[in-house]
Image (cartoon, rainbow, N blue to C red):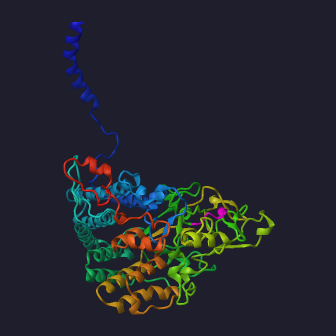
Amino acid sequence: MNRFIVFCLFTLPLIACKEAEILRESPSGTYTADNMYVTEAHFESALVMLYQNYRSLNYSGNDNAFDFFWGTDITHSGQDGVVRFFSDYPATLDPTAAKVLYHWNGNYKIIANANTILSRLPTSEVPSERQHQIAAEARFFRALAYKYLVYLYGGVPVILEEITSPRNDFVRATKEEVILQMVEDLQFAAAHLPDIAEVAAGKVSKEAANHLLAESALAAGEYELAIAAGSLVIDNPALALMTSRFGSRSNEPGDVYWDLFQRNNQNRSSGNTEGIFIIQFEPDVIGGGQLSTARTGYHLERFHAPNTPLATDPDNRNLIAEGFLWTSHNGRGVGWLTPTFHFSNEIWYDEEGDIDYRDMRVSEYNFPRGIWYNNPNGPERYQNVYFDINTDENQYRLENFGMWSRGIYPYQTKVTTPGDHPVNMILDSETMQLRDAAGVTYTDWYDMRLAETYLLRAEAYMMSGNAGSAAADVNTVRERAGAIPVDAAAIDLDFILDERLRELGMEEKRRLTLSRVGRLYTNTVKYNRYNADDIQEHHQLFPIPQSEIDANIGAELKQNPGYN
C-alpha cells in the first residue's frame, strides 16, 4: 500500500502537466478574439450585433420589454397579482428580482460590445476615414445604452474601454457625469455619421444622433444645445411630418396618423419622411426577428390590445359575452397593458369636458372605443351588437376603482395591424379569426420619429423661457393631427408631457421620459389609480441589482436610497 501511495505522489504531477496540455483550448471556428476585429467586414458584423442587442432587449416578446409602460401614467397591469407586471411596486422592484438585473445586464452588454469595437478599431486594417464612421455608430449605441441605465438606475459605473480581465472594483459615477458622457458620445456621432438620406433602412444617422443629443442635452440642462441639435434634425430637407395619406393602405378608410403605423409604412422607401430610427423586422427571414407561424417578435399587440373574449354583455356586467373572437381587425390581445383613464380620456378632453374628436389621434381608426360583436355563430342576441366602453362593467369599475375592465377598453390600433395580419396567423378567412399563436405587432417600429423631435425642441424652448417658440413646435404636431392650436400661455411641462402621450402613446419609453424630467412618482400617483397606493418616492429609480453589489468586492457599489 505504501509503495502505491509513493507511486501516486510521484506520478500525479506528471499527469497534471499532461492534463494541462490536453485541456488547452484549440478554437475550431474561423474567428477568435484575436483575429475577429481586423477587417472592415469584421467591424460591420460587430455593428450589426449592436442593432440585434438593442432590438432583442427592448422590442421582443420578453415581458421586461414593457417595463417602460407598466406602473406609469400611461398603463397599468390588467391582471392582478402578477408581480412582474408592476402589480406591486415594492415586490416588483426588489433588488434581487430578475427584472432589475435584466435591464442592467442587457444595456451593459451593448456597452461592452461598443467598447470592444472602439478599443480594437485603431489597430485594425480599417482605413482611417472609415474608422470615424464606425466609431460614431458604436458611440451612438453606447450613449443609447447609458440613456436606459441612467434613467432607470441613476448614476452608474461609466465604462469606456474594453475590459479584458476580471474586475470587481466598479464605482458609480453621478447621474450628471453619465449624461455628460452621453452628450460627448452623441456629439461625436452626429459629427461623423452620414445623413439620413444616405443610410439604409434601420441604420442610425446623423439625425438619429442629433435627436438623442437634443434629449440628452435637455437632461443636462443645456437648453441651447438641445435647441440647436433638434433644429438640425427638423431643418433637414429630407425630413418632414407626414400630412397626406400615403403607403400600403392609403386607399382604405383611415387617416395619415393611421397610415404611419401600417405594415411596410415606416421606412423611407414607403414615402415616409417622418421616421428617424426604425427598428427593423422581417417575418420568416433569418435574423428578421419575427415569424408568421409562431408568436415570435414584438408582443405589443398581445399586451396592449383588450382581451375581447372577456367582454361583458352590455346590459349585464356579470354575464360574459359568449363566443367573442380574436380577429385580425382588433388583434389577439390579453389586456395586460391596460390604459389609465388619464391616457384614454382625460388628455383628450376639450373645454367642455368631452373628447375632442377633431384630433385624429383619438379617432375610431386610432383609438377605438368599442367593437362590433364578431362571431356569426354566436348567440342571436349579440348579432349586430356594438360592445362599447360604456358597458355596465366598465361603469362599475371606473366608478369604484378608476380603472377599465380587461375585456374592453380604448386602445391604440398602432400596436396591431388591423385586417392585415400574415396569412399564416388567420384561422378563418371569412371571420378573420386569428390563431392562438397571434399577438405579434407585425410592423417595423419607431424608436425615433420627427414628431418627437418637435416636442423635444418645444420642451427646450419652454425651459429656456421662449414660450412662443415652444407653442409653435407643439402646434406643428397638433396641426397635422387636426387638433386645435394651443396658446403660448398654456405651455408648461404638464402640457408637453400630455402632448407626448397624445402623439407618442405606446411608442415612447414613458418610464424613461418621466424619470428624465423627475415626474415618475408624481404622475403615477396622480393619474394611475392602480399603482397610486403602492408606488413610493424611491421607486423613481430601480434598485442596483443586489448580485452586482455582492460581486463587486473590490469597491463599494452603493445601493439606491430606499432599497437598503
Observer-nearest of 272 and 440: 440
Residue 209, position as x, y percentages in the image: 32, 73
* Res 217 quadrant in image: bottom left
Observer-nearest of 297 and 516: 516
Residue 350, position as x, y percentages in the image: 53, 88
Q: Is residue 462 above or below residue 415?
A: below
- Most distant residue in the right direction: 380
Q: Residue at x 37, y 83 (%)?
A: 234
- Residue 190 located left or right of residue 378: left
Q: Is residue 309 magenta?
A: yes
Q: Residue at x 43, y 65 (%)?
A: 68
**Which quarter of the rendering shows the C terminus?**
bottom left
* Res 447 quadrant in image: bottom left
Q: Is residue 486 above or below residue 542?
A: below
Observer-nearest of 283 and 220: 220
How many labels, in total? 0
Q: Where are the magenta residues, as a range?
A: 305-310
- Residue 407 located left or right of residue 337: right
Residue 158, position as x, y percentages in the image: 23, 60
Kindly tell me whether residue 513 is visible in this rendering.
no
* Res 119 quadrant in image: bottom left
**Which quarter of the rendering shows the N terminus?**
top left
Observer-nearest of 88 and 99: 88
Kindly tell me whether residue 394 is visible in this rendering.
yes
Residue 270, position as x, y percentages in the image: 51, 75
Q: Is residue 438 magenta?
A: no
- Residue 137 located left or right of residue 355: left
